[in-house]
Amino acid sequence: MRGRLKLLFPIAAVAALVMAAVSGAGHPRGGTLVFGTSTDPVILDPILVSDGESLRPIRQIYEGLMSVKAGTAQVIPSLARSFKVANGGKVYTFTLRKGVKFHDGTAFNAQAVCYNFNRWYNFTGPFQSSAATSYWQSIFGGFKSTVGNAQAPEGQRQSLFRSCKVVNASTARITLTRASGSFVGALSLPSFSMSSPKALREYEANKAEVRGGSPVFTGTYGFAHPTGTGPYRFEAWRVRERLSLVRNGSYWGPKAHLSRIIFRPISSNAARLQALQTGEVQGYDLVDPQDMPTLRTTRGLKLLDRPAFNVAYVAINQAKPPMNRLAVRQAVAYGLDRNAVANSGIYAGRGQVAHAFMPPALFGYAKNVKKYNYDPARSRRLLQQAGLSLPVKIQFWYPTGVQRPYMPDPPRIFQAFKASLDRAGFDVEARAAPWRPDYLNAAQTGDAGHLHLLGWTGDYADPDNFLGEFFGAPKPQWGFNNPKIHNLLQRADAETNRKKRIALYQQANRLIMEFLPGVPYAHTKPGLGFQTRVRGYIPSPVSLEPFRLVFFGGGV
Amino acid sequence: MLRFVVRRLLLLVPILIGLSLLVFIFIRALPGSPAESLLGERATAETIAQVREQYGLDEPIYVQYFKYLEATVVERDLGVSIASRRDVWQEIKERFPATVELTLAAMLFAVGLGIPLGFLAAKRYGGIFDHASLFTSLIGISIPIFFLALILKYIFAVRLGWFPSIGRTSILTVVEPRTNFYVIDTILARDWEALRDVLRHLVLPAIALGSIPLAIVARITRAAVLDVQNEDYVRTARAKGLSGFVVDRRHVLRNALLPVSTIIGLQVGLLLSGAVLTETVFARPGMGTWLTDAIFARDYPVLQSGILFLSIVFVLVNLVVDITYAIINPRIRYS
């Protein structure tokens, strides 16, 4: 037996070498990857979705003008080769990649770009529902029929988009109503991917009705004929069982390794892990923190880290005295033992202390912000110097019945913070409320005590999606109006020169951590589970992994 | 008999109205609404109000109820899921067969094993087999389905790899859905490989779900057989020289099965509720997983119509049980 094995080894090695040489890219081609998802996509028409399980396959079938570099939050050109900004950041001229074809054989060109943008801007009826076009509305605002219309919801009365013009077949010009630096970053969202105009028309993508308040799409485009330019083509979708994509053999770029990817919906976290253990799936997302040790220690399985793209924070409401005084906010910051929380078992070794309201992976992050290491004596001093008698009574809210990647166990996080604040001269009164609707309502209306726990996971790679979201304008949640910060963030959003934008956001980060509207305490890395033989999966901070790079390697 | 059936069917109307009202109110009594569930931390007071208005959740609850009744009864529209935006009736048509298939498989397991076990235990009354089966059936009744399902899955799917752990078919098995009962569909398509795959996926869930009814059926059979065995007519049959086998089959078992058949009917409710748990553990796309997900998403249309549908099924099954009972036992007459 042993002798036979010895003989087999060199043969296998030679065979592997030959295979590698033939495949060209150095990785073995072919194979089917089954990936466990938490649920089915809603629809495969990019503009109509904002949830992760819809965006995951869409990212493989479609491409947009911009994309993000694998494994980073860096925005790079995709179907656009380059772009030029003119007129103070209001006019974007995109030079498009040539020779790109949609899966139905039609050409991708400037006409297709404008067709897509005009389709979105001219949406009517059910398509204007926030449940249908949530990303369009959060980035661009309104539609042609709602702009300037007093009857439309407030957020839809303006639009960032003005027009799209075909300059020539490979040049499209998009004009905005105001300067926006985050526009290009937002275009990397798969929601703004390019669909084949022919397929959109043929399969009635614009057919919909409203039933019981829900927009219901009655055309077959998004269910049976999604047509993009991506490295994978749609093959079949049987709801609740499988969605399969096959390699696009005429892809314009380096072709995918795997010949087929199948997304299989399994709603229970435990069932996804077991399906990985039995080999019924070869990878899955959204690993529970308690399952991570199993993945790490089981032979043949591995845990991949997704770079942190979230922030957990303790919000301070300045509308509630004495929080309007900087010294008291500083006392809170010095009184929160963030290290003990972020590096504790609560985060299962996947947390890191946050020093800013945005993740370090994102441009505009500043390392030299004011830092507040745990120092209870200093907190007490600050409170006394502010003329307050100790202990200072404060109300601290935390949510129940919720688990977020950035907040795996809110009651335990609260307990740890309460203990450290009590040592720092505060008398913390605990208030718990169910996540929805009570807690979120209270937080947003500014009724969640002096302090409350909350956090955020980024949608796309732009600081505006963090800092702008929190502090771009006065909000009852924070209870302050600081024109210096609000204006700086609005200026940063409008700036289109990347270097200047970075500098502005760094300045904003420093300013914010001086002003202390709240205390960010943790960034966490979510995990993905795989069989070890699955290679080339590069976790993305914004959860946009290209399956094009994935292949089956050797190994156990 | 006909009058009995008609009366029972007419009684369905007030039951359904009462039930729909209860379900409607209970669901709305849950904290949160689809709005918060859809929006999460992105919710602002403004967007929540907008979504609530969109789904008509800002109207008084009785207005909402009457609108719901109107849509369901007059327009025969069960609505659209808020989370998946799929037609609720379409979804029921695809999912309900999966649940029925699992329930029937579990029933088959419980009856097919329970009756012989109970019969043997009675025949060996007081012996080791009797004690052993009593003991196992006690365990069977006491273990929660959920727990048993997890254990079975861990041992036979994850550890030993004998059976699949999730779904109704393997990922590469394609079943052309005609009836959505995959066992029937694969037989219709004469795809024996696929049929084998579908059956393999049924084994563990059916055992998990069928364990409690199995224990109950075995115990009732045992008691009934013991009872009947001492009847005069059994003694007479023996005395006139019939073989043991014929006596058991014709006189003992046939009479003993009467109480067992009632019990089987009553188990349907238990099986339907148990299917919810079993489906979740084995990720089978049936009514159970659908309703559980809908509770978390506060998907009102799905919950309202899904629960109501299951209730109708439950009531109808009970009616059918009553009727078959009369057919099996001619001594019973309904009026």
Image (cartoon, grey):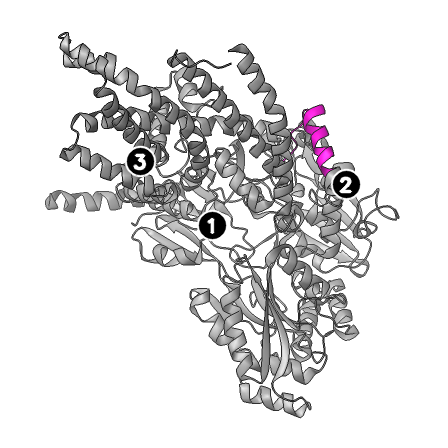
Query: Outermost residue, front direction?
Result: B232
Name the residue tied to disc 3.
B163
Name the residue tied to disc 2.
A118
- Front: mark 3 or 1: 3
Decide whether residue A298 is among the magenta residues: no
Badge 3 sits on which subunit?
A: B
Badge 2 sits on which subunit?
A: A
Q: Are marks 2 and 3 on the same chain?
A: no
Given residues B150 and B86, the one toward you in this image is B150
Secondary element at image label 2 = helix
Q: Quadrant of the N terminus of chain A?
A: top left
Name the amino acid, label 2: Asn
Q: CA distance from mark 1 to mark 2?
A: 35 Å
Query: Outermost residue, top direction?
Result: B240
Q: Earlier in the sequence, mark 1 or mark 2?
A: 2
Mark drawn on residue B83: none
Secondary element at image label 3 = loop
Residue drawn at 63 percent across, 27 percent down: B14
